[in-house]
Image: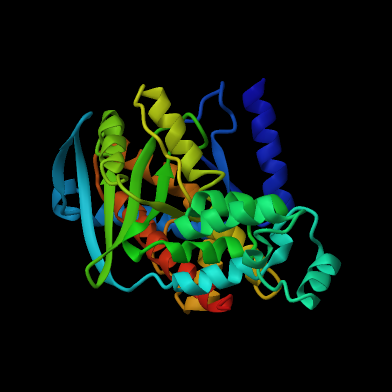
Amino acid sequence: MGRHIGRRLRESLERASDVVVAERETATAARPFGASWVDVREFHEAQRLKQDLLRRYRGKRLEDVLPGEEVRTARGVCYRLVSSEGGRLRTVDPDTVRRSILADLKLLYGVGEVTEAALKRKGLASIADLAEHPRFGLQAREILRMVEAGDTAELTNWIGRWFQKSHPLALLASGFHSEEDFVLIDIETLGMFQRPIILLGLARVRGDGIRVEQFLLRRIDEEPAALAGLLDHLGGRRAFVTFNGRTFDVPYIRERLAYYGIRASLEGPHFDVLHFSRRAWRDCVPDCKLTTLERCFLGIEREGDVPSAMVPEFYESYMRTGNPGPLVPIVEHNRRDLLTLASLFSKLHEEWQP
């Protein structure tokens, strides 16, 4: 019965809108909604792309099509792809961050716009000026401690307590980090939670450019090794940069780590570019999808891209046929997402430069 309900809903949605319900090749009667909603045009373009890739790469080895290296991790062997691209991560300097945070007296409980204006008329223009204030002194000293320590995790939590988490001050707090601290993460999966991650991508500033490392599953049983490979890159002082990673990527990685009984901490400062982008640009773009922002602000039109919703279908084609062709756009899609993430992170800092 579930199969028929799922089919009827799918058919009605397709008749009523410009979407196609892309069936998962592994969907079953028990999981009639093993599918994703895809724009009609994108769906048919992706199907043509997949067939072309299957023809072009028939008989080819994955290692020849996507040159990489086997790496041994604490959980076994996995396959890693490495590439580099010119570029930097632009933030603001730490002195500017300090001035901007300490100048906003509304970070103190009990201070609104009226009280802030009254305090500033008395010459109390900075949180530092309130360190000995009988009412606000305790809070002021706590903020001063976080600012002097450059503790972005505590600061962004404090800012999110009084303002929205997408407030410009939360983004500017990233200026307490060096470029090398930032870990940009993007994953590709076989569906929603409790399905394997098939590609873990991360990017970091190294030397005079951005180094992208991607852990690609040649077989599903390589997932724990790939997760361990990711963890090997998360030591030391770090700050995550993601696009919807607070809701999706990081919780998903945590769930997969727990599934394999791998103990690890993914705590730390987290700058989710999706939320900052919505605050900065929602009134001037049709939507805040990564590819829309990429097109509108970076002037990039992707060719031969696979829609995120169809990544599972492309990967399952590879698993079924052994043909590496469908993996090519998945890897490039993930790499491009990471580089665009870096560019948008920098552009937001330009937008909100104090």
Residue 129 placed where, x, y %?
A: 66, 67
101 sits to left or right of 110: left
| Residue 272 to residue 86: above or below | above
Q: Is residue 38 visible?
A: no
In the image, 172 versus 217, the foreground residue is 172
Q: Quadrant of the C terminus?
A: bottom right
329 sits to left or right of 111: left
Number of numbered labels in the structure image: 0
Quarter of the rendering containing residue 181: bottom left
52 sits to left or right of 111: left
| Residue 244 to residue 105: above or below | above
| Residue 288 to residue 146: above or below | below
- Residue at position x 43%, y 52% in the image: 240
Residue 48 placed where, x, y %?
A: 41, 57
- Residue at position x 73%, y 62% in the image: 106
- Residue at position x 49%, y 54% in the image: 152
Q: Quadrant of the N terminus?
A: top right
